C-alpha cells in the first residue's frame, strides 16, 4: 500500500506554473545546481516543497538584481528557516533598509564597512558593484567579512594601478 504524502508534490509543469517560470527554467536551475535534482526521472518525476521554496527565493533574489552565481552562493548559505523567510518575501521589495544594488562606485574612498556583528547566515542587506573594466564587474555583499572586503579593495587597487600605466 502507498503511504500518505506528508508534503505537497508537483509535476514539472505544475511547479513551474506555481512560481511563474517555464519548465525549461526549472530544468536549467537543476542543471546549474540552484535546485536539487528531483528524486525520480521520467513521467513519475515529482518536485517537493524545497523546490518550491528555492524557486520562490530565486525569484526574490532576481528581483534584487543578483546574478545567478550570487544567487547560488546565497542559497547555499541560507538555513532552512532563512530560506523559508526569503521565499515568503515580496519579490519586488528591496532588502530591508537599503537599495538592492547601489550604483557603481568610482575611484575614491572605500565603501563604509557593515557592522562586525553581521550574522553570516543573514541575507545580505545590499551589494556593492564596481565596474573594474569594460565587461568585468566585482560584486561584494555588505555582509562580507573584513578579510573579503580587504581582498576586494586590493583587487580594485591593483586594477587601478595597472590602468594608470
Image (cartoon, rainbow, N blue to C red):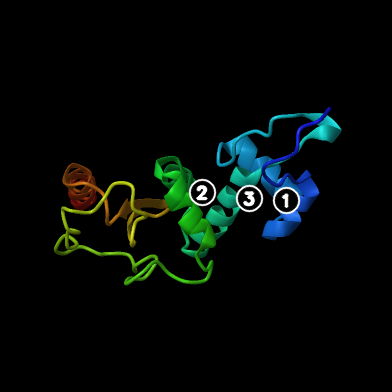
- Circle 1/circle 3 CB separation < 8 Å: yes
Up the image or down, 141 lies above or below 11; here it is below
Identify the residue shown where x is 64% and y is 33%. 37
Choose between 71 and 153: the one closer to the eye. 71
Please tell me how crowded label 2 is: few (under 14), some (14-19), or many (20+) other residues with Cα within 10 Å.
some
Determine whether, in the image, residue 83 is placed left or right of residue 149: right
Q: Which mark is residue 15?
A: 1
Please tell me how crowded label 3 is: few (under 14), some (14-19), or many (20+) other residues with Cα within 10 Å.
many
Identify the residue shown where x is 53% and y is 55%. 57
Identify the residue shown where x is 70% and y is 41%. 47
Choose between 43 and 129: the one closer to the eye. 43
Residue 61 in view here: yes
Q: Which mark is residue 62?
A: none
User: Between disc 1 and disc 2, whose residue precedes?
Assistant: 1
User: Between disc 1 and disc 3, whose residue precedes?
Assistant: 1
Determine whether, in the image, residue 106 is placed left or right of residue 103: left
Up the image or down, 43 lies above or below 20; here it is above
Residue 22 in view here: no
Q: Which mark is residue 68?
A: 2
Please tell me how crowded label 1 is: few (under 14), some (14-19), or many (20+) other residues with Cα within 10 Å.
many
Q: Secondary structure at mark 2?
A: helix
Please name the residue that numbered disc 3 is placed on: 52
Q: Secondary structure at mark 1?
A: helix
Q: Give the Cα separation between the discs numbered 1 and 3.
A: 7 Å
Q: Secondary structure at mark 3?
A: helix
The x, y position of residue 136, in whole percent, is 39, 50
Q: Quadrant of residue 126?
A: bottom left
Determine whether, in the image, residue 101 is placed left or right of residue 40: left
The x, y position of residue 165, in whole percent, is 19, 48
Amino acid at each position: 500500500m502507498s503511504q500518505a504524502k506528508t508534503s505537497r508534490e508537483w509535476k514539472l509543469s505544475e511547479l513551474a506554473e506555481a512560481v511563474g517560470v517555464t519548465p525549461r527554467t526549472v530544468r536549467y536551475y537543476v542543471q546549474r545546481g540552484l535546485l536539487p535534482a528531483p528524486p525520480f526521472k521520467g513521467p513519475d518525476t515529482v518536485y517537493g516543497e524545497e523546490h518550491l521554496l528555492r524557486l520562490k527565493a530565486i525569484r526574490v533574489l532576481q528581483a534584487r538584481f543578483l546574478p545567478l552565481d550570487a544567487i547560488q552562493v546565497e542559497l547555499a548559505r541560507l538555513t532552512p528557516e532563512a530560506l523559508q523567510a526569503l521565499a515568503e518575501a515580496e519579490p519586488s521589495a528591496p532588502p530591508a533598509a537599503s537599495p538592492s544594488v547601489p550604483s557603481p562606485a568610482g575611484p575614491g574612498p572605500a565603501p563604509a564597512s557593515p557592522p562586525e556583528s553581521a550574522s553570516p547566515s543573514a541575507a545580505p542587506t545590499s551589494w556593492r558593484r564596481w565596474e573594474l573594466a569594460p565587461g568585468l564587474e566585482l560584486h561584494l555583499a555588505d555582509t562580507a567579512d573584513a578579510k573579503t572586503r580587504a581582498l576586494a579593495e586590493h583587487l580594485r587597487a591593483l586594477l587601478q594601478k595597472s590602468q594608470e600605466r
